[in-house]
Image: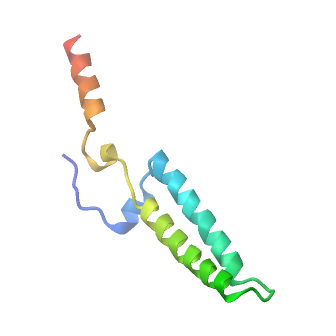
Amino acid sequence: MKNRNMNLASRIASPTPKWFRIVRNIGLSLSAIGGALVAAPVALPATLVTLGGYLLLGGTIIGAVSQTAISSEEYGEKSEKNSEASSEETVQ
C-alpha cells in the first residue's frame, strides 16, 4: 500500500486525469476572459467589470482545484473496473 500522505507540491506534480484537465482548461479560459474584462483599457460599465472580477476569481479557483486532482490508481487505490478486469485475468 502506498503512503497516502501527499503534500501539495507532489499532488500538483502528479499526472492529472483527463476530465480534470478539461475542467482546468475551462477554468483558465474563464480567468483569461475575466482578466481581459477587468484590465480593459476602455471604460466599461461597472457591471461588466464586476462580472470580469467574478469570472477571474471563479476560473482561478476551478483551475487550482482541478490541478490538484489525481487518479485513484496514482493514490494507491484500484477502481472497481480495474479490480474486476484483473480478477478475470487471474481466473483465465
**Is residue 33 depicted above or below 19 in this figure?**
below
| Residue 8: quadrant of the picture | bottom left
1, 56: nearer the viewer: 56
In the rendered image, residue 48, in percent from the top left (x then y), is placed at 67, 81
Q: Quadrant of the C terminus?
A: top left
Q: Is residue 81 above or below residue 43?
A: above
From the top left corner, tell me how far across and down residue 4 is, in percent: 22, 56
Residue at image point 72% right, 87% down: 45
Residue at the spot 38% in from the left edge and 60% down from the top edge: 11
User: Where is residue 22 drawn, in percent x and y?
Assistant: 54, 51
In the image, residue 11 above or below residue 78: below
Residue 25 position within the rendered picture, expressed as x and y whole percent measured from the top left = 57, 58
Which is more toward the observer, 79 or 56?
56
Q: Residue at x 59, y 65 (%)?
A: 28
Q: Quadrant of residue 26?
A: bottom right
**Is 40 on the left or on the right of 92, as rendered?**
right
